[in-house]
Image: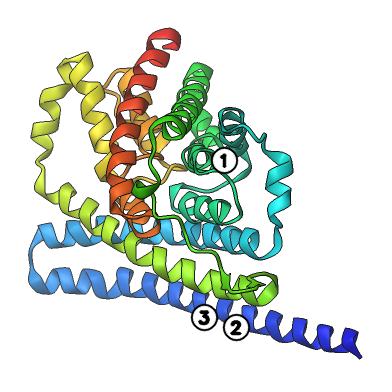
Amino acid sequence: MANQRTVVYGLQVGLRALVYTVLGGAALIAIVTVASVLGPLLALDLYTPPVAAWWTVFTAIAVQGVPFLLLGTVVSAAIGAFVPERVFQRLLPRRTALAVPVAGAAGVVLPGCECASVPVAGSLMRRGVAPAAALAFLLSAPAINPVVLVATSIAFPGQPEMVLGRLVASLTTAVVMGWLWARFGREEWLRPPKRSGGGHAPGSGPRAFVSGLQHDFLHAGGFLVLGAAAAATFNIVVPRSLLEVFTGSAWLSVLLLAVLAVVLCVCSEADAFVAASLSGFSPTARLAFMVVGPMVDLKLIALQTGTFGRAFAVRFSSVTWVVAVASSVLVGWWLL
């Protein structure tokens, strides 16, 4: 009798999850329809090219990020609902200094972009993983996974040093930031994600999975939209002629592309093709663009703010940008 109840309950939860998936797919189709049909009509109605350009960039970033955000929230909800804390305690070394590089190297298992890494890192913290290790995973996952590395090799054919440079510089940045947080981070700076469930009943099982998926996707999706809007605004405010002034200086070109990576919010699985198109810049500058982008951009800062708090996002993003630029310069000088 108990087994029958379990089966019935599982079927009910599975059906509910299927309904939510269908509704999520319908919502995504609605977003694409509105963006592709109503957006251009609105731009034409206002009859201003900047409005059309803003809508195009905003739509591209938002639609590009939503699927990977959904992937991240699914992984996050699955970790929170089905993976016991003891699994992470066994996989990761107990010493934080050793757990950080292990977690950073584990970033290769998540084939997604930075939109997916934030909810997954939050779920890892809820499951008892040290914040320093979870943050190292957050930075490395969108930068060194196989999809990104393959895309980089395709964007830079015949230049394996660019792929190796991206891997080394990104992993170095992630590990260094994990160690820095372990050494200098303060608890009051980080608003840890709340554990699902309350009281004596831990949040686990299919019901917790559906609940976590709903909460994380809706919560992070709002900040994704805010970040996309900020990036689109920058694209139409800053003139392209101003960017050309910096290409003559090696140092200024690195800093410029590192800043552009923050504001353009290009998905980590597509930024290599953007970097390859910037042929007027040095290889080191383009490497900096690919290393900084998956770790620090406007939509990622917005997602971190919503998940971990503004005090954390401001400090962590600022230091990450500096470390990523320094790692890119050092690796570029060594390999490129």
Q: Quadrant of residue 58?
A: bottom left
Q: Amino acid at mark 3?
A: Leu
Picture coordinates of residue 53 (x, y %)? 18, 56
Q: Amino acid at mark 1?
A: Val
Q: How crowded is the residue under tag 2: few (<14 C-alpha within 10 Å), some, or many (20+)?
A: few
Tell me if label 3 and label 2 are in contact, CB under 8 Å. yes
Picture coordinates of residue 181 (x, y %)? 42, 35
Q: Which mark is drawn over residue 15?
A: none
Q: Residue at x 38, y 24 (%)?
A: 287
Q: Secondary structure at mark 1?
A: helix
Q: What residue is disc 2 on?
A: 19
In the image, farthest residue toward the front: 200
Q: Residue at x 56, y 79 (%)?
A: 20
Q: Amino acid at mark 2?
A: Val
Q: How crowded is the residue under tag 1: few (<14 C-alpha within 10 Å), some, or many (20+)?
A: some
Q: Secondary structure at mark 2?
A: helix
